[in-house]
C-alpha cells in the first residue's frame, strides 16, 4: 500500500469540510468507519471512501435522520434514499412557510410602528381617512367601571380565544363602542376590546356571531389622542366637531391603539395609550 492512498482523520475532515469530531462520532455509531486503524491507533480512511462520505453529508445537511442514512448505507436502496429526501423536503417546505409567516408578522409590526410615528404629528386634529373593509373580533368589557387591569385582561381573553382558532397574527387592536350608546351617559355599556382579524380568516361565524364585527370600506372621521380608551373627553370633542362641520357619521366607533403604555418615554406623556378614534362617514 502506498501511504498517499490513505487519509488520517484530520486530512479527511479538511478535505470534505467537516470537523474531526464528526468523523469520530460517525465511527462510534457505525455510520462511517475507517478502513483500518494503524499500529499507533490512528484511523485511516481510503480515498475511495470520500464519495460515500460526501453522500452521507449531503443527506445529513438536508435533514435526513442519521438512522435513515445508516440503514441506507448498510443496505443501499434508491427508494429508501428518495423517501428520506422527500420527507426532508416536506419538512423544509413547512419550515419555509412558518418562516414566511414570521416575516409577515414582523413586516406588519414595522408598518404599525412607522404609521404610529407619523400619526404623532397630528394629535387632537380631526381628519378624514380612507380604510378598506375590516373585520375584528370583539369581546365586551362587561362593566362601565373600567380600569387598566380590566382593559388588559379583556385583551388577554381575546388572544386566548383566538388562539383556539389558530390566530396569532398581531394586526392591531383597540376598543369598540356600539353606535347606540355613544350619546348615552353609560356609553361604555356593551363596549369592549377588539383585535383585527386577517382578511382570509377562517372562523366559525355561527359560534362567534356576537364577537365578529365588520367595519365597512370608506371614509372615516378620525382623531389621534393620548388617553385610555375608556375616557370620553376626546370622543365628545370629535362628535361635536362633526356636528359643527355638518359631517354625518354612523356606525360603531373604534379607538385603535397605535402605541400602548409600553412606549411611554417615546411619546413623552403620562402612562396612557396613543390611539386613533375612527367613525364611519355617511355619504
Image (cartoon, rainbow, N blue to C red):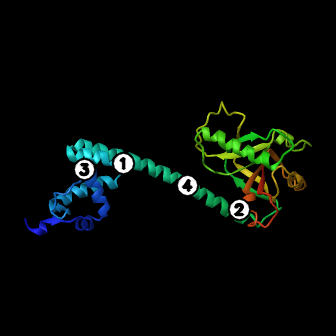
**Of callouts 2 and 3, the N-terminal one:** 3
As drawn, 175 above or below 268: above
**Of callouts 1 and 3, the N-terminal one:** 3
User: Tag on residue 104?
Assistant: 4
**Of callouts 4 and 3, the N-terminal one:** 3
Q: Secondary structure at mark 1?
A: helix
**Of callouts 4 and 2, the N-terminal one:** 4
Instruction: Please give the residue where the numbered disc 3 appears in the rendered image.
Output: 30
Q: Secondary structure at mark 3?
A: loop
Residue 36 x %, y % = 16, 58
Mark closer to the observer (1, 3): 3
Image-based side of 27 in relation to 216, left or right: left
Instruction: Please give the residue where the numbered disc 2 appears in the rendered image.
Output: 116
- For the point 27% across and 53% down, the residue is 28
Instruction: Please give the residue where the numbered disc 1 appears in the rendered image.
Output: 89
Crowding at dot 3, Cα within 10 Å, few <14 / some 14-19 / many 20+, comes out as: few
Disc 1 and disc 3 in contact, CB within 8 angstroms: no
Crowding at dot 1, Cα within 10 Å, few <14 / some 14-19 / many 20+, comes out as: some
Depth check: give the residue in front, 226 or 88. 88
Crowding at dot 4, Cα within 10 Å, few <14 / some 14-19 / many 20+, comes out as: few
Q: Quadrant of residue 199?
A: top right
- For the point 90% across and 41% down, the residue is 186
Image-based side of 121 in relation to 61, left or right: right
Amino acid at each position: 500500500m502506498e501511504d498517499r492512498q490513505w487519509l488520517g482523520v484530520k486530512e479527511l475532515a479538511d478535505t470534505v469540510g467537516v470537523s474531526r469530531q464528526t468523523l469520530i462520532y460517525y465511527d462510534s455509531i457505525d455510520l462511517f468507519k475507517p478502513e483500518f486503524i494503524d499500529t499507533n491507533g490512528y484511523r485511516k480512511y481510503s480515498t475511495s471512501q470520500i464519495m460515500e462520505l460526501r453522500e452521507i453529508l449531503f443527506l445529513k445537511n438536508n435533514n435526513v435522520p442519521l438512522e435513515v442514512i445508516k440503514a441506507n448505507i448498510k443496505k443501499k436502496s434508491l427508494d429508501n434514499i428518495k423517501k428520506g429526501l422527500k420527507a426532508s423536503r416536506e419538512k423544509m417546505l413547512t419550515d419555509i412557510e412558518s418562516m414566511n409567516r414570521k416575516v409577515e408578522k414582523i413586516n406588519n409590526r414595522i408598518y404599525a410602528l412607522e404609521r404610529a410615528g407619523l400619526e404623532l404629528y397630528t394629535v387632537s386634529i380631526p381628519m378624514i381617512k380612507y380604510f378598506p373593509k375590516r373585520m375584528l373580533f370583539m369581546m365586551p368589557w362587561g362593566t362601565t367601571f373600567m380600569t387598566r387591569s380590566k382593559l388588559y385582561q379583556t385583551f388577554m381573553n381575546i388572544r386566548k380565544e383566538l388562539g383556539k382558532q389558530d390566530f396569532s397574527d398581531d394586526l392591531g387592536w383597540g376598543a369598540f363602542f356600539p353606535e347606540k350608546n355613544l350619546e348615552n351617559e353609560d356609553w361604555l355599556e356593551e363596549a369592549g376590546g377588539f383585535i383585527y382579524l386577517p382578511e382570509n380568516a377562517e372562523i366559525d361565524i355561527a359560534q362567534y356571531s356576537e364577537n365578529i364585527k365588520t367595519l365597512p370600506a370608506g371614509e372615516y372621521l378620525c382623531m389621534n389622542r393620548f388617553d385610555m380608551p375608556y375616557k370620553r373627553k376626546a370622543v365628545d370633542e370629535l362628535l361635536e366637531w362633526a356636528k359643527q362641520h355638518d359631517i354625518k357619521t354612523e356606525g360603531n366607533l373604534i379607538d385603535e391603539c397605535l402605541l400602548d403604555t409600553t412606549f411611554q418615554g417615546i411619546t413623552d406623556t403620562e402612562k396612557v395609550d396613543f390611539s386613533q378614534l375612527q367613525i364611519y362617514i355617511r355619504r
